[in-house]
Amino acid sequence: MTVRVLWGSLLATGLAAGLIATLSACSSGSPDAGDPTVAPTPSETAELPSPTPSAEAPGVLTVPVDCTELLPESEQRELAAEGLTLLGGPGSRFGTGYSPDRTPEELLGGISCVWDREDAGVGEGVNQSSIMLSVAPLSTDTYQQTVDELTQQGLNFSETDDVAFYAVLGDESGFPLQLNALRDDSWISVVSARGGQDAYDRSTVLADAIAANVYG
């Protein structure tokens, strides 16, 4: 198992402000044993409304090599308007050294990018502003492995014609949100330190924006 980790902002000195949220997730092909996955409690897996992204993601998947290319410019401007800066991942302020561990998506040849407030964690007990967005390519084998791993986490399942969703709503008091959108050849995920319905609605918009941007 590899623990999915969402880190708080790095201080100006380059030191991590601390771990702000963790989600247990097995990484495909990882040999680590780790702790067993703890499924969310029933209150955390209350039935969620089905996301409604684009009915299809036409074209060929192109996984970006730089986080500045993950989202359309309109969504990048929206995150900036929310006070969030691209801090982690290739092409970000702190690059790939922002997190000490590779994400499951990165282990599959994908990319993970973290947006956060630059002052997050300074003078606050809990940082709930971080958002990690990821996309990874999937083959027939890694698709099934990913489905198995997400299912083991006890995430809520829903689907449209071409997308399988595995999600947990989280809450506004420290339990993070996770949304995973799986197509035959891709895994798009959103992990938000702040959960709740508003954050969930926002995550579906971001997942849809990523899909629109990486399929051409």
Image (cartoon, rainbow, N blue to C red):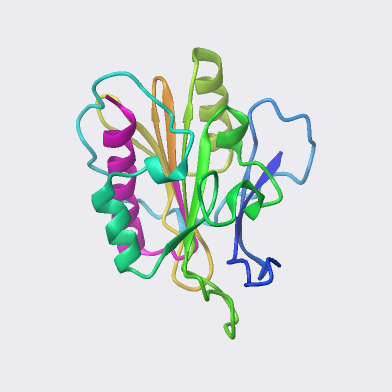
In this view, the residue farthest toward the top is 140
Residue 50 position by quadrant: top left
Residue 118 in view here: yes
Residue 36 in the image: above or below residue 193: above
Taking the spot 55% from the left edge, 21% from the top edge, the residue there is 142
The residue lying toward the viewer, choosing from 158 and 57, is 57
Task: Judge left or right: residue 144 versus residue 29.
Answer: left
Q: Can residue 177 be seen in this view?
A: no
Identify the residue at horizontal 69%, vertical 46% (top origin). 101
Looking at the picture, does residue 105 appear above or below residue 118?
above
State the image coordinates of residue 65 (x, y, percent, origin top left).
Answer: 48, 34
In the current view of this chain or complex, which residue is farthest to the left? Answer: 55
Left or right of 116: which side holds 75?
Answer: left
Q: What stretch is highlighted in magenta?
A: 190-216
Image quadrant in which the C terminus is located = top left
Query: x, y (%) of residue 141?
Result: 55, 15
Q: Position of residue 38 (x, y in %)?
A: 65, 50
